[in-house]
Every structure is written in structure tokens, then in C-alpha cells.
Image (tube, rainbow, N blue to C red):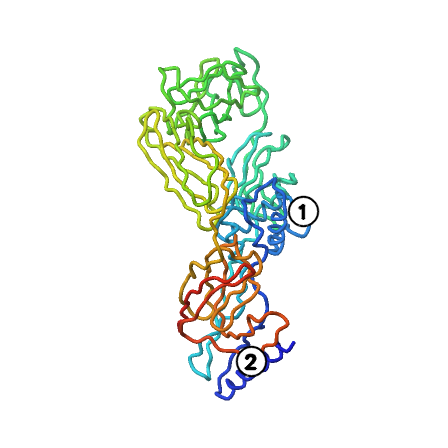
């Protein structure tokens, strides 16, 4: 109490002195309050769907505080479910990060770095004593609250066939899709930008499609629903196709046609459905470029499916390429349809390079460099000769971790790559090696290494970044041996107590406007010192905790 009274008296003296010089100032803020990061210290690993633990609860507490749509205290379960994944995606969208739904290193850094509360406000610069310039406060982005449809995967679809809606503002699992006047409830969206529904069997013609959820109702787009039709009979087929219900299936001539493919692009092995008219019940042949896929059936005469092949056969044999191929159908009566394009976007596992073996240490001491040898095999095809081999060591989120560059080679057949790495902290790490060719085909393999010992040494301060700046500048103190929750940073004659650390290696500190020896006095001791304003100059900076005291670094306060 005595410490507080003396500090207040001292601060009042400064303020009265300012009044005497006809200057006007803002409040200096509450002195002696504890500042730090909320829900940050416990987030030391990647978190994703299916995981449990106290760090999951910490993450959920932080996400609840963001007040995202659909969130609430009900999420605080300690289990990483779909609702937590959706909230993480909202936060990633807010910070401009990839919306993976995984609390990875970049996301945790955004959570930690985004929760800082400056212990002292930034004071404005006044151009004249009479007309002060007030501080400009940041403009926070406005995130979309409305739901919007940008497009459909297809503007026409058959009854009982899937359609994907693309847009923004879709809820995780409470969307209602209206197909005409028919509501389809509880449609989920894993990413907030797309969702799928099945066209009801009792709707035909042109209908309006729109989405309704907690954000409101979207715009409407048109969808043409193709009705189910009764075949015109069995072979040799009716010659009067006009007696059949549109779209006139199984007609001998003039009516065999393809309307659309679903999907229109994909990898080798993708199942593609062709929608059209005039397909035979059995004996259809799909022509895929120069290849032939025969013996395909159609249960309704208006749709059939095939799988994108890895080899084209029929007119010779050749490997599939990353290219666009014309697709057409010939029915059992010998009639051939029009052709539509399909683009092969990936060769899947066909021709992909592989990792034959990995050799390296299974145990390692901290600070000791280990060596790993990776043998790969690359299929000798002219368009996949360039290969890259990369490695993830498993300690990327730890301060002081080393990063290995990607190794690139022009390879055919077997080749060996060597990687080296040293770990700065003990633990069990999973090392993942990945080999990729020029066509984007990839394979991965892992190894495990147990690291023991300690390389942290005694309490030390290695750097302050930046090393100069104005009052209110936030700096990063890097070193070893910091306490997780209780460190004192000394700055000049004062400082700040009870600051947390990230992984024992990083402390965030904001340069104050005023300092006093009372800042760092142990609770219960009497302090009669007054405040000193932090003016331009060089100040000593160091850290102290229950382990000891670090070395001192210099920080220069600028104008």
C-alpha cells in the first residue's frame, strides 16, 4: 500500500508540473498491472481434429474470446472437434493464414503475438501546445457476415445427382439449401466456401437455388434439373423416339449425346460420370483421347461412369500425360456422341518417385549433428526426371531450430541424398523425408530420433530485437533459461515483473514511458522512489528469475 501511495504522489507531481507549462496530456495508464499473453504458454505443439489435452482447452478458451459465429462456452471440452476446427479456420482467415483448421506453428504464433497488451499507451506527438494531434487508432478489418453464392459446379444436373455450391459465409453444419421451394437442412461446409447437396428426385425444370444460415440468406442462382426418363425399349430400340419422355434415351440415331462430365478434371484413378442421352443398357464404349474403355453399362440410359486410366489402349499403348483429352461415348448400336474435354491434373501414384531407404541415428545428444542418408528411386520417364527431396525435422516450432534447404537433382533410377541436423532440445522427434518429381507426384517416409541431454546452459540473454526504437516499441528478448510464467525484465532503473516466456527462449517486452525502482521491488517492501521519464538515450536491459540473472544488453531509445 505504501508503495502505491508514494508512486501516485510522484506521478501527480509530474502531472501538475505539466499543467504549469500549459501542456495537455493523456493519462499514463495504470501502473503496476501485470501484462502478458493470454492462452499462449500452453500451445507448444500442433493441434488438430481428434486431439485432447489442456492445451486444447487453452486454444478453445482463446477462440471463445473471439466471439466467432456459432461459438460459445459449450466449446470448452478439451477435445479438438469440428467446431474447434471451424473456429481455428475463422481465426486463420482473420489473420490471412491458410485456412487448414490446424493450430500449426504459424497459427500459434499469430495467437501469441496477437494477444499482447502494451503495459503503457503510445503517446501522441503534439504539433503545438494549443492544438494537440491525437493518436490514430488502427482500423480493424470487417469480416463478411453475409452468405453469398458465386457459382455452381454445374448449371444443369440430373435428379439424384450431386451439385456443389461455391461462395462465402457458409456455416460449419447448419446450412439449409433451398432447391426451388424444397429445403434441404443441416448441410455441412468444411471450409466455409463450398458445400454439396443432392438434387431431389421429385424436382424438374429450371429452379432457383439459394442458401440460408445464421448469417442470413444468400442470393439465388438458376439450376436446370434433368428429369429421369423411361428408356425407349430394348434393342433394336424404338424408331419413334418422340414417344419417350425427354431426354429420349436409347434412341438409334441423332439422340446419342453428352451433356456434361462430372468432374471435368482430376487425377489418374478419378471416377468420372458422363450425363447425356441415348446410352445403351450394356456395351457402351468410352473413348478417352486415343484410348478405349469398353464394356460400360448404363442403368438408366442417361448416365454412365468410368475411371481415368493410367495407360491409353486401343490404338497402340501410351502412358497418360498431364493434358486435356476429348471424351465421347459409342453405344452398342454403333452410334457415337459428341465429345467434351477432360483435363488430367495429376498422375497420382503412376510414375511417382519413391524413397527406397533411410539410414540415420536413432538416438542423438542435444547440440550434436546427426547425418541421415536417403535413397530414392525415380521412374526413368523423360517428363519426370527432375526430383526434389525435402525434410521436416519436427522441431521447426522451437527457438533455435535449424532449417535444411530443399535438395534438387536430375535423376533417373536410384540416387542418394544426405542431410545433417542438430537438435537444441531433448525429446522424441519424427523426421519426414519427401521426394517430388516435376509432375507434382510425391512420396514420403519417416524416421524417429530420440534426443537427450541439455544444451540450454544457464540463464542468458542473447539478443534484443530491435535494439533501438521509440517509447512503446515492442521488442523480442531471446535467450535461454527463461521461466514459463514469472520473469522480471530490468530496464534502466525500473522494469516489469511477472512476464511469461514462450518455450523458455523468448520474452516480449514493451519499452515503457516511465520507469522507477519501485517497478522491480519485491512485494511487501517499501519504495519511496519517484517515476523517471524514459528519454532518448541508451539503457541497460537484462532478465532475472528464480534461476538467476542474465547478462545485460543495451537498448537505445530514439526520438
Q: In the rendering, at what x and y percent does residue 471 appear?
A: 46, 71
Disc 2 target residue: 11
Residue 148 to residue 460: above or below: above
Residue 382 seen in the figure: yes
- The image position of residue 88, as x and y in percent, is 56, 48
Q: Is residue 450 above or below residue 115?
A: above
Q: Quadrant of the N terminus?
A: bottom right
Crowdedness near tag 2: few (<14), some (14–19) or many (≥20) residues, C-alpha within 10 Å: some
Mark 1: secondary structure: loop
- Tell me which corner region of the image, top left, top right, bottom left or bottom right, holds residue 300: top right
Quadrant (top left, top right, bottom left, bottom right) of the C terminus = bottom left
Q: Is residue 39 left or right of residue 254?
A: right
Observer-side mark, 2 or 1, equals 2
What is the secondary structure assignment of the residue under circle 2? helix
Name the residue: 40% across, 20% down.
311
Residue tagged 1? 77
Amino acid at each position: 500500500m505504501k508503495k502505491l501511495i508514494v508512486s501516485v504522489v510522484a506521478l501527480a507531481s509530474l502531472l501538475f508540473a505539466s499543467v504549469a507549462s500549459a501542456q495537455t496530456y493523456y493519462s499514463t495508464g495504470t501502473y503496476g498491472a501485470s501484462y502478458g499473453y493470454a492462452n499462449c504458454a500452453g500451445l507448444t505443439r500442433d493441434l488438430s481434429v481428434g486431439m485432447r489435452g489442456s492445451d486444447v482447452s487453452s486454444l478453445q478458451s482463446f477462440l471463445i474470446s473471439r466471439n466467432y459465429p456459432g461459438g460459445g462456452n459449450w466449446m470448452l471440452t478439451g477435445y479438438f472437434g469440428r467446431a474447434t476446427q471451424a473456429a481455428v479456420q475463422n481465426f486463420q482467415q482473420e489473420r490471412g493464414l491458410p485456412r487448414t483448421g490446424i493450430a500449426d506453428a504459424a497459427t500459434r504464433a499469430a495467437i501469441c503475438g496477437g494477444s499482447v497488451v502494451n503495459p503503457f499507451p503510445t503517446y501522441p506527438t503534439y504539433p503545438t501546445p494549443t492544438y494537440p494531434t491525437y493518436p490514430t487508432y488502427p482500423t480493424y478489418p470487417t469480416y463478411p457476415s453475409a452468405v453469398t453464392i458465386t457459382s455452381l459446379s454445374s448449371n444443369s444436373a440430373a435428379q439424384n445427382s450431386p451439385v456443389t455450391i461455391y461462395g462465402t459465409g457458409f456455416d460449419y453444419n447448419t446450412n439449409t439449401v433451398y432447391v426451388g421451394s424444397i429445403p434441404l437442412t443441416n448441410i455441412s461446409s468444411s471450409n466455409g466456401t463450398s458445400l454439396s447437396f443432392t438434387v431431389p428426385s421429385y424436382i424438374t425444370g429450371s429452379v432457383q437455388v439459394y442458401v440460408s444460415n445464421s448469417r442470413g440468406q444468400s442470393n439465388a442462382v438458376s439450376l436446370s434439373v434433368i428429369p429421369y426418363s423411361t428408356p425407349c425399349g430394348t434393342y433394336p430400340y424404338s424408331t419413334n423416339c418422340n414417344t419417350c419422355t425427354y431426354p429420349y434415351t436409347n434412341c438409334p440415331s441423332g439422340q446419342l449425346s453428352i451433356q456434361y462430365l462430372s468432374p471435368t478434371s482430376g487425377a489418374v484413378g478419378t471416377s468420372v460420370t458422363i450425363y447425356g442421352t441415348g446410352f445403351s443398357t450394356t456395351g457402351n464404349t468410352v473413348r478417352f483421347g486415343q484410348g478405349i474403355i469398353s464394356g460400360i453399362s448404363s442403368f438408366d440410359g442417361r448416365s454412365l461412369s468410368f475411371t481415368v486410366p493410367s495407360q491409353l489402349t486401343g490404338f497402340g499403348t501410351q502412358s497418360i500425360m498431364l493434358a486435356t483429352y476429348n471424351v465421347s461415348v459409342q453405344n452398342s448400336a454403333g452410334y457415337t456422341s459428341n465429345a467434351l474435354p477432360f483435363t488430367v491434373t495429376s498422375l497420382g501414384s503412376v510414375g511417382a518417385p519413391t524413397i527406397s531407404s533411410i539410414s540415420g541415428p536413432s538416438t542423438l545428444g542435444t547440440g550434436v549433428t546427426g547425418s541421415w542418408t536417403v535413397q530414392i528411386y525415380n521412374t526413368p520417364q523423360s517428363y519426370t526426371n527432375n526430383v526434389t527431396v525435402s525434410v521436416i525435422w519436427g522441431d521447426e516450432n522451437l527457438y533455435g531450430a535449424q532449417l535444411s534447404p530443399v535438395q534438387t537433382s536430375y535423376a533417373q533410377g536410384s540416387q542418394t541424398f544426405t542431410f545433417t541436423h542438430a537438435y537444441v532440445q531433448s525429446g522424441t522427434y519424427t523426421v519426414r523425408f519427401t521426394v517430388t518429381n516435376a509432375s507434382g507426384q510425391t512420396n514420403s517416409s519417416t524416421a524417429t530420433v530420440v534426443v537427450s541431454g541439455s544444451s540450454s546452459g544457464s540463464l542468458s540473454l542473447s539478443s534484443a530485437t530491435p535494439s533501438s526504437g521509440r517509447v512503446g516499441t515492442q521488442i523480442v528478448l531471446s535467450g535461454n533459461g527463461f521461466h514459463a510464467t514469472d520473469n522480471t525484465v530490468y530496464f534502466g532503473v525500473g522494469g516489469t515483473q511477472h512476464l511469461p516466456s514462450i518455450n523458455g527462449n523468448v520474452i516480449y517486452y514493451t519499452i515503457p514511458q516511465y520507469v522507477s525502482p519501485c517497478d522491480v521491488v519485491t512485494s511487501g517492501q517499501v519504495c519511496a522512489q519517484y517515476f523517471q521519464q524514459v528519454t532518448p538515450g541508451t539503457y541497460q536491459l537484462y532478465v532475472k528469475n528464480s534461476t538467476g540473472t542474465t547478462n545485460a544488453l543495451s537498448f537505445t531509445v530514439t526520438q
